[in-house]
Image: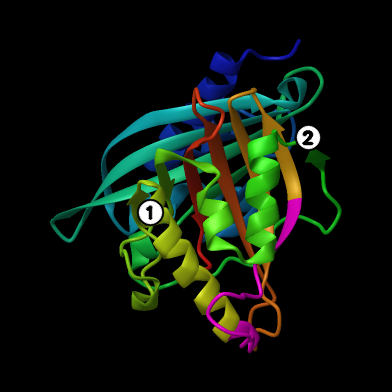
Amino acid sequence: MALTSADQQTVATALVEGLISGDVAGVRSLYAGPADIDDPAAGRQIDGGFEKLVREWAPASLTSVKSWDVTHSTTGANGRFNGTEISLVLDKNGQDKDLDLVVVSEFNEGGGLVRNRLYYRLARVTGVQHVRTRILGEEPINLEPFNPTLVEYQKQLRAGDPDGQANTFSPDGVFNGHGESQDLRDGLGMGVYRGREAIRTVLKQMFEVGDEEAGFDSGEDEHSGAIIEKLNSFTDGTTTILEFNIIHANHPVNRTSAGIAAYELGDDGLMKEARVYDEAW
């Protein structure tokens, strides 16, 4: 029997509780088969290999977790996938540090847990910028149709049009990149941008940085755009979760950057909030 959205959220929170406390047996008991976890710091660990990951989970072993709360939970694909977003407060060297993460849980037809993928900005824990390479295969595992707003958002993202992309947001919409700076050139990741005009400004800078990486120079109003490889999407009708790779054209080192985003619509049908969890910027 498929689990309800609330039940699936409970599985995700039990996983995080087990990772924080280092409870190997507790985490193992969540799975219908071999324990399978993919983590930014530890990579993918299956069955016996996951035990070290649980005992030494980076946010709990390199810092101290003071508190945490579930902020959003999205179930789609007839219960096959759940994305639970969780906000943690870490104590890092005596200072509070926020860490937002997403647990993508994959379930079998009987409602048994088969795999978890965790996404968070590792630099919030280690202080060192991190780029996560491909974690899913090149073939999509599930792609549900996008709503018209998200179709336009993705179209303008690929076209490199910051104006068109910003216009998919409500006037008071929010873009949250979960980084630590308003300026991408600081190398600390995209922060939180509130309101369409602030979003427009950072998207323009994002495309400019992408142009430099790709060796693209065609003027101020033309950009190379972002190449997004869509690998898994599911929706509850209001929020769409998208797992993806960013393809860095002509990048000298990293060909792909794995990430995830939660796109939430407002009552006006425009983007209320884009919550992006990747480590590319």
Which numbered marker is on residue 145?
A: 2
Residue plotted at (70% across, 76% down): 255
Above or below, 31 relative to 100: above
Question: What residue did someone put label 1 on?
Answer: 197
Looking at the rendered structure, the secondary structure element under dot 2 is loop
Left or right? Give the position of 215 relative to 271.
Answer: right
User: How did the renderer colour the structure?
Assistant: rainbow
Query: Which sits in the foreground, 122 or 188?
Result: 188
* Residue closest to the far right: 139
Q: CA distance from mark 2 to mark 1?
A: 28 Å
Residue 114 at least partly seen: no
Which numbered marker is on residue 220?
A: none
Above or below, 25 relative to 205: above
User: Image quadrant of residue 215?
Assistant: bottom right
* Residue closest to the far top: 1
Residue plotted at (70% across, 43% down): 151
- Magenta span contains residue 256: no
Q: Check disc 1: other Cα within 10 Å, few if <14, some if 14-19, many if 20+.
A: some
Q: Which residues are magenta?
A: 213-230
Left or right? Give the position of 166 relative to 229.
Answer: left
Q: Look at the magenta stretch and give its main secondary structure.
A: loop
Left or right? Give the position of 16 relative to 63.
Answer: right
Looking at the rendered structure, the secondary structure element under dot 1 is helix
Above or below, 124 relative to 249: above
Q: Position of residue 75 (x, y in %)?
A: 63, 24
State which mark lies toward you, 2 or 1.
1
Q: Amino acid at mark 2?
A: Pro
Q: Amino acid at mark 1?
A: Glu
Q: Position of residue 68 (x, y in %)?
A: 32, 35
Residue plotted at (58% across, 65% down): 132
